[in-house]
């Protein structure tokens, strides 16, 4: 029988435990919203994310996601992106509503997801194939295969190469002047 995991809040200088917060099974990474008011904990064996109010140190909601979530990465667009490794998906969470607002079915194991500073593109590491897939935010939410991504942009973007060995490119790709 698996018991729930815990998040420990430690004093940064002394490392003494200040608070202990019960979360789901096999908690992985703790990340924070850009404003620092909420903490997100991916619970790998529970297939959910615990959302903690930083001020009260209480779980405010548990959000169901796909199999084996590892981290909830803050995007510059204000959303949190959860990489679900076994499911080969990324879930976009809205910190305001504490709900899943988008799902990206990738077809590869995501390592980390991050939006660009402008918030107009989502970059996801593809550890299965040793690549970074870019500009996922402009694509259909049910997509995910890299070959479809390359076909879509190599035919419409004169700056993209069509060889499969190149790094995937996106509409904002431009030659260096």
Image (tube, rainbow, N blue to C red):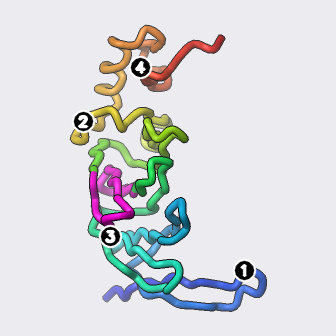
- Magenta residues (range): 82-101
State which mark lies toward you, 3 or 4. 3
Name the residue tied to disc 2: 140
> With respect to residue 44, does 152 lie above or below?
above
Name the residue tied to disc 4: 164
Mark 2 to mark 3: distance in Å?
Answer: 24 Å
Mark 3 to mark 4: distance in Å?
Answer: 35 Å
When asked about the image quadrant of residue 83, the answer is bottom left
Q: Residues within 10 Å of mark 2 (few under 14, many from 20)?
A: few
Name the residue tied to disc 1: 12
State which mark lies toward you, 2 or 3. 2
Name the residue tied to disc 3: 48
User: Can the viewer see residue 125 in this picture?
Assistant: no
**Element on which disc 3 rests:** strand
Marked residue nearer the N-terminal end (2 or 4):
2
Q: Say which residue appears at 47% left-offset and 21% top-offset.
A: 165
Mark 4 to mark 1: distance in Å?
Answer: 47 Å
In the image, taking residue 158 as reference, residue 138 lies left or right, namely: left
């Amino acid at each position: 029988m698996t018991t729930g995991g815990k998040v420990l809040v430690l004093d940064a200088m002394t490392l003494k435990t200040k608070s202990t917060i019960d979360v789901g099974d096999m908690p992985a990474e703790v990340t924070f919203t850009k404003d620092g008011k909420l903490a997100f904990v991916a619970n790998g064996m529970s297939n959910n994310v615990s959302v903690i109010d930083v001020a009260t140190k209480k779980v405010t909601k548990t959000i169901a996601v796909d199999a084996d979530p590892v981290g909830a990465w803050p995007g510059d667009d204000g959303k949190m992106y959860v990489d679900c490794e076994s499911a080969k998906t990324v879930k976009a969470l809205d910190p305001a509503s504490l709900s899943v607002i988008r799902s990206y079915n990738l077809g590869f194991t995501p390592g980390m997801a991050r939006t660009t500073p402008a918030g107009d593109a989502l970059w996801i590491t593809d550890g299965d194939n040793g690549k970074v897939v870019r500009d996922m935010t402009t694509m259909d939410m049910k997509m995910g295969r890299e070959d479809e991504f390359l076909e879509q942009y190599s035919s419409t973007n004169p700056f993209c190469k069509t060889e499969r060995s190149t790094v995937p490119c996106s509409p904002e790709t431009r030659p260096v002047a």
